[in-house]
Image: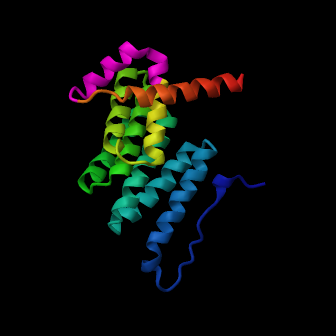
């Protein structure tokens, strides 16, 4: 039986192959995601790099930034933290330049997860806070996920340490404590129900 990561794109191309390059990039990206889910990080990295090359060649800005974030995620899961930081930083640069605010918040959330993997909790809070600041006035799933990420950190370190880490990152902004306490109550309720 073949594993999902053994999938290969066919080499045959239609006569209008140049028009299919974005589709090919999407296929490589999806193969990379499948390999990531199967914990085959080497194959995921190879597939995502192929997708990235096509997307950069075609100047598909949003797709390029998304693939950069995915490469950063794969590198983090594979324990290659320097590579992960480099990929996510490049994604942040593109998303900031092109004012892709919700997508930028996703990149900051990914950087927060990287910092947690590196056992840098204060830096993780900073990254989550930066992401939340970008989408604080947008009602989106990303905003709600960042609120949950921040609430988990609040739970782990306590309110005093959390507020200190937030203020170190964003000295001009106070953390949205009412929202975070509400998210924290939901997390605690979920944890109680899981027991």
What main secondary structure does the magenta stretch of the protein show? helix
Q: Residue furthest bottom?
A: 15
Which color mode does the image show? rainbow
Queried whether the magenta region covers residue 108, the answer comes back as: no
Q: Residue furthest right?
A: 1
In this orientation, does residue 94 appear?
yes
The region drawn magenta spans 153-172
In this orientation, does residue 117 appear?
no
Residue 99: image x %, image y %?
27, 54
Q: Quadrant of residue 161?
A: top left
Residue 25: image x %, image y %?
47, 65
Name the residue at 54% across, 64% down: 27
Q: Quadrant of the N terminus?
A: bottom right
Name the residue at 58% across, 66% down: 9
Q: Is residue 82 above or below residue 50?
A: above
Queried whether the magenta region covers residue 165, the answer comes back as: yes
Q: Is residue 76 above or below residue 53?
A: above
Residue 71 lies left or right of residue 94; in this view the side is right
Residue 95: image x %, image y %?
30, 52
Q: Nearer the viewer, residue 32 or 176?
A: 176
Name the residue at 36% across, 65% down: 60
Name the residue at 53% across, 79% down: 13
């Amino acid at each position: 039986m073949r594993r999902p990561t053994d999938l290969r794109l066919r080499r045959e191309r239609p006569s209008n192959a140049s028009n299919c390059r974005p589709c090919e990039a999407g296929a490589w990206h999806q193969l990379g995601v499948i390999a990531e889910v199967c914990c085959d990080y080497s194959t995921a990295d190879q597939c995502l790099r192929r997708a990235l090359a096509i997307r950069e060649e075609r100047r598909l800005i949003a797709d390029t930034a998304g693939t950069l974030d995915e490469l950063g995620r794969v590198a983090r899961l594979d324990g290659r933290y320097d590579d992960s930081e480099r990929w996510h930083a490049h994604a942040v640069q593109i998303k900031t330049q092109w004012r892709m605010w919700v997508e930028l918040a996703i990149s900051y959330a990914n950087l927060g997860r990287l910092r947690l993997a590196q056992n840098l909790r204060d830096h993780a809070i900073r990254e989550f806070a930066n992401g939340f600041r970008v989408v604080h006035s947008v009602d989106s799933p990303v905003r709600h996920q960042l609120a949950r990420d921040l609430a988990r950190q609040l739970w782990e370190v306590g309110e005093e340490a959390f507020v200190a880490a937030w203020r170190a990152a964003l000295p001009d902004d106070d953390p949205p404590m009412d929202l975070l306490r509400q998210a924290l109550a939901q997390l605690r309720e979920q944890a109680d129900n899981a027991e």
